[in-house]
Amino acid sequence: ITKKEALLWTDGRYFNQAENQLKNTDIQLMRQNEPDVPEPGEFCAQNKNLYKIGIDPTTCTLNFAEEFRRQISSTSSKPITLIATEGNLIDIVWSKQRPTRPCNEIIPQPIEFTGASVEMKLIRLRAWLDEKKIQGIVLNTLDQIAWLTNLRGSDIECNPVFFSYAVVTIHRAVLFAGGTDVNNIRTESSSLDKHLGQHWEIFPYISFGPKAVSSICLSSNSRTSSLIIALERSTATMAMSLGLEEVGIDLRLIDVSPIEYMKAIKNQTEIQGLRQAQIRDAAVLCTFFAWLEEEIMNKKQNISEAQAADKITKLRSLFIEQYRGDSFPTISSSGANAAIIHYQPTHENCSMISSNNIYLCDTGAQYIDGTTDITRTIYIGGGEEGENNVHPSVDALLCYTLVLMGHIDLARINFPDGISGLQLDAIARAPLWTQGFDFNHGTGHGMGAYLNVHEGPMGIGGGALPASKLSNAAKLRYLSDIHSGYYLSNEPGIYIDNKFGFRLESDLLVIDCPHSLRGKTLGATRRKFLSFEYLTLVPFCRNLIDPSLLAPYHRTWLNSFHSKVDKIINAFLSDPLCPLPNKQATMTWLANACAPI
């Protein structure tokens, strides 16, 4: 914001949405990474009247500040100073209307779901500290802290985490959480004190600060030399860095916390939980799609996008012992709304889901044994010829089938251990590129095990941007090695503004390649090869597939996958303990959806 202009930068995921929401405002949309659109730092450098720029050090990460300075220096030689503001200007405007910070109950996650004790995780982290000759590490990433402590919360909607900081040294581990009184935390649950007692100390959340960190580190450091404390560059704020330096701490800035790598590799207990969560959620979505088709096509009911999203949540909530909430607000989008990548309907403002139209549903769940993130795009109609039955357009068939081909190509690939997501990204985009299509988001993101639906350190993507536009943060994510045990999504798409959108997303587990590969047999390489285990068991939409575009291997993969879906989900629904309604109707829908192509 300058004296004369207000500008908002956002990436391709939000172009459509931002354009709609910024109508009739004085805020100019800057389409990030598009040709001839300067980055924020480049804009400031090009503006001859900008020499001093205010920045909130409590919300800006070290990565952001470094990237901003790089953009300035690469564009202009004029001196521009970043000035740390005292207080956030938005907070002043927000004033008393700002909601209070949640401070909900913190709950131990049993070892039967984590597969590793708090003690073992601390041993691994301290081994890293010892190896790097670092006295301690400061943590402010909530899912890292939740993983390290085997605790879960509900302070952030859809994410089972709690507001916290943590400091770990060779001899001490301190958790800053809860409100002003640490006793409130310990009395919330008798099991919490037992869970953390001998391994962690608990301080009030509001007592975290540079002086507290210094005191903890000094008390566990017998050396007279300066303290070296690790700080994650991508999540630590400028204020945290400056504050720690002011109290005499020597910072070792690291690109990625070691916990991010430890957390990413799921152990066998977590993997088994993810498999069970995927089967459960697939059964929910098959029940939902069978219901939706029946309501709209046969009963001629009016179902809104918001009502459809509510139905999914209601079905999940039938699993009382396992369900903990959705992993993000469901993207329930019909027709042209499906082109808005992160569209979110409300009961006050949404469209009806009509027959003979595209419907995109991107939804996920938090179960105590795993996290899911699934997208299917369907076309309700297009079956038997009838008076009110219209088949999808040629363009719709082309776009959906290309997305499906890219999705299958990525899902079935074998690849060398340690390859990056940037290298895998082109595999999913190749069928789209051959026809001149692309999509403005990543192809895949890391996922937690009953933790955040988005996690690092890796991702599959980068192909939507010119190489020169990749930020340092994107390079870290998309150039990170991929290893066995990683859990990630596969979600290519095509979006045509004001017309339709297609996305197909399933969740994959990276495993050691189970097949005998000819190149390995002949000695062409000594590298270990990996594959994906395809966990999501929801069928694809037959009405939107153009079989003439599929290669024989696409057809073989698809028929084999659908046969597996039909068998596993039918068995799940047949269990008398399964609480889902209308099981026979869902099984009939499954039989049609999974028929060979």
Image (spheres, grey):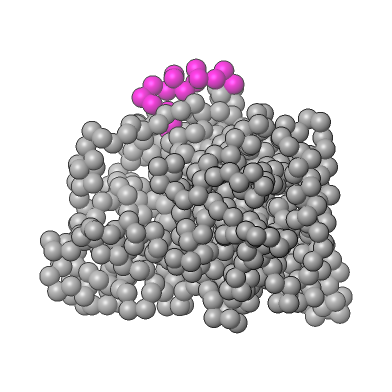
Query: Residue 345: where, in percent of width, then height?
Result: 45, 47
Q: Which residues are magenta?
A: 176-191
* Residue 519 % position (x, y): 82, 78
Q: Residue at x 79, y 66 (%)?
A: 597
Q: Quadrant of residue 461?
A: bottom right
Q: Residue 134, how many percent across, how many down? A: 48, 50
394 up-or-down from 583: above or below: below
User: Which residue does the image show at 49% across and 69% down from the upper left?
Assistant: 496
Q: Is residue 198 visible?
A: no
Q: Nearer the viewer, residue 221 or 399?
A: 399
The residue lying at 59 percent from left, 29 percent from top is: 108
Name the image quarter holding residue 560: bottom right
Q: The N terminus is located in which quarter? A: bottom left
| Nearer to the camera, 387 or 260 | 387
The total of numbered circles placed on residues is: 0
Q: Residue furthest front?
A: 387
Q: In this orientation, does residue 503 appear?
A: yes
Report the side of 70 relative to 562 (left or right): left
Point out residue 586 in the picture as x, y percentages from the top left corner. 75, 44
Which residue appears at 70% of the width and 72% of the height?
546
